[in-house]
């Protein structure tokens, strides 16, 4: 039985330009939504809730602008605004049943909003659903608008909202890395380049650098978000503003800015704003860059904790669950593994967004529903998982200081310290001899009287070698 059909599977008749359609009696949507619900069943998923909220904000602002400019009856506008505010507040979410993979440009979702708001507004006016003579989804809710300018406007708003959700998450993760870096600052360890011995470093500085990388992502995202603040509303179907009253787009943007407290502005060139989704691609690129950085960091943590008996084992990560169904006592870096999978999905989503962004043709890019699904999906993954990664992994990083110090003391790269003293080639010969004899470079240098014990202690002091002296 259809979940919206009502008693005994009852239906009502609704009409669109193709004819009559049976719509479940319990549904607030209309004919075009019902057609789309039957036509597009690609994923079994539904459109992102943030996008629906953003779209309802656009419809609310449009109704206010239309009544202000004399294009819409005040009673109708007030009913539309009230219906939109209910959706913005989280009500009627079951009335948006459409698959994110749908008709190009998002016409299906636009009409879903138009029909739900129209029917709810009719109820608020004490009229039956589907009474198009009183209030029309196309002529009233969609007045002065097109899918082609409302969908990208809603998409920009939704992405900006999710960026706003992600920023504090990234800041917190950066802070936790920095806190652990401060706590473990005294730990000196072997550095590694090419996965081979390199000059000594401080574990704390390594961890703090991860925080710095996340803060760089925030700066890049802020720059991308500024471009998303430019909205194409008012461009109508092709950027010409056909059937749009003068000042409508600007008035909608003003209302949206006040309602969302975002620094929104009207696009300077509505033709470009209709054609190009470059700003969406740029924000997706920021998330791709973040995913690449997080993958790098997760892999570093997995390397540093490898072992415990046969790997580096310089650090330990919290044991959050048993690691094997057959090997007793095995504990795996599962939080870092999960983060890597999340990042791979974000990178894949960015590929989908990139292909969609370049697929625009002439006056419109019809691939916006895919952009919305992929990019908002990436935000969801990161916003959901990064707090767990911070709390259940990074916060619990501990160091085996003794092992770290031992690796640092035995590193062949300590010969680098001798370059200014004896020269590069003699230092290289000493390193080779050190490796063959199994004697640390420092000890061998003193033994061969290249350095006095006092000079060796000074030159090879941890503070000096790690740039703190």
Image: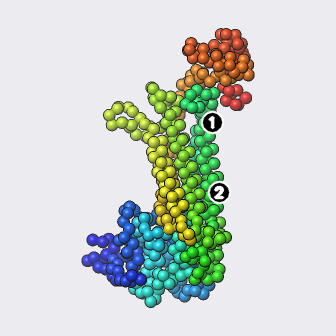
Q: Residue under circle 2?
A: 223
Q: Give coordinates of residue 304: x percent, y percent.
A: 52, 33
Q: Residue under circle 1?
A: 205
Q: Residue at x 72, y 17 (%)?
A: 422
Measured Cα–Cα span from mark 2 to mark 1? 27 Å
Specify few, some or many for label 1: CA neighbours under 10 Å numbering under 14, 14-19, or 20 or more. many
Q: Residue 108: which quarter of the image?
A: bottom left
Residue farthest to the bottom, as pictured: 133
Q: Quadrant of the N terminus?
A: bottom left
Tag nearer the camera, 2 or 1: 2
Q: Give coordinates of residue 312: x percent, y percent.
A: 50, 28
32 sits left or right of 271 in the view: left
Q: Residue at x 44, y 89 (%)?
A: 133
- Looking at the image, is 224 positioned above or below residue 247? above
For the residue pair 20 and 164, the one nearer the viewer reads as 20
For the residue pair 361 and 412, the one nearer the viewer reads as 361
Q: Give coordinates of residue 436: x percent, y percent.
A: 56, 14
- Looking at the image, is 29 positioned above or below residue 401? below
Disc 2, SS: helix
- Looking at the image, is 294 positioned above or below residue 194? below
* Residue 379 in sight: no
Q: Earlier in the sequence, mark 2 or mark 1?
A: 1
Which of the numbered marks, if any, corresponds to residue 122? Answer: none
Q: Residue at x 63, y 53 (%)?
A: 220
Q: Give coordinates of residue 195: x percent, y percent.
A: 55, 31
């Amino acid at each position: 039985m259809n979940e919206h059909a009502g008693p005994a599977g009852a239906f009502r008749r609704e009409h669109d330009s193709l004819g009559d359609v049976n719509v479940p009696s319990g549904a607030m949507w209309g004919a075009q939504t019902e057609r789309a619900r039957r036509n597009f069943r690609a994923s079994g998923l539904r459109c992102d809730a943030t996008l629906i909220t953003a779209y309802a904000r656009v419809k609310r602002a449009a109704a206010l602008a239309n009544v202000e400019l004399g294009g819409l009856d005040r009673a109708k506008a007030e009913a539309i605004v009230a219906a939109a505010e209910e959706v913005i507040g989280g009500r009627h979410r079951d009335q948006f049943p459409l698959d994110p993979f749908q008709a190009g440009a998002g016409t299906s979702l636009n009409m879903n909003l138009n029909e739900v708001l129209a029917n709810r507004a009719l109820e608020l006016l004490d009229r039956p659903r589907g009474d198009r003579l009183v209030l029309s989804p196309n002529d009233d809710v969609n007045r002065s608008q097109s899918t082609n300018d409302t969908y990208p406007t809603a998409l920009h708003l939704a992405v900006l909202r999710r960026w706003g959700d992600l920023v504090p998450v990234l800041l917190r993760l950066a802070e936790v890395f920095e806190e652990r870096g401060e706590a473990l600052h005294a730990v000196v360890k072997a550095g590694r380049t090419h996965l081979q011995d390199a000059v000594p470093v401080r574990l704390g500085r390594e961890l703090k650098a991860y925080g710095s990388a996340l803060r760089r992502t925030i700066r890049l995202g802020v720059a991308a978000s500024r471009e998303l603040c430019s909205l194409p509303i008012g461009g109508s179907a092709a950027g010409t503003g056909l059937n749009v009253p003068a000042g409508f787009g600007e008035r909608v943007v003003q209302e949206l800015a006040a309602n969302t407290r975002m620094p929104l502005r009207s696009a300077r060139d509505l033709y470009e704003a209709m054609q190009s989704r470059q700003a969406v691609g740029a924000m997706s690129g920021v998330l791709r860059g973040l995913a690449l950085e997080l993958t790098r960091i997760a892999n570093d943590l997995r390397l540093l904790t490898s072992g415990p008996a046969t790997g580096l084992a310089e650090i330990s990560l919290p044991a959050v669950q048993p690691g094997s169904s057959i090997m007793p006592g095995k504990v795996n870096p599962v939080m870092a593994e999960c983060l890597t999978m999340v990042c791979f999905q974000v990178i894949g989503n960015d590929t989908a967004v990139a292909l969609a962004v370049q697929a625009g043709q002439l006056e419109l890019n019809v691939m916006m529903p895919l952009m919305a699904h992929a990019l908002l999906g990436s935000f969801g993954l990161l916003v959901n998982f990064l707090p767990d990664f911070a709390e259940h992994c990074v916060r619990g990083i501990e160091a085996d200081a003794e092992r770290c110090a031992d690796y640092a003391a035995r590193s062949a790269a300590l010969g680098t310290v001798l370059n200014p003293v004896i020269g590069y080639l003699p230092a290289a010969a000493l390193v080779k001899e050190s490796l063959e004899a199994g004697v640390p470079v420092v000890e061998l240098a003193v033994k061969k009287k290249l350095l006095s014990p006092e000079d060796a202690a000074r030159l090879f002091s941890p503070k000096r070698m790690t740039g703190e002296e």
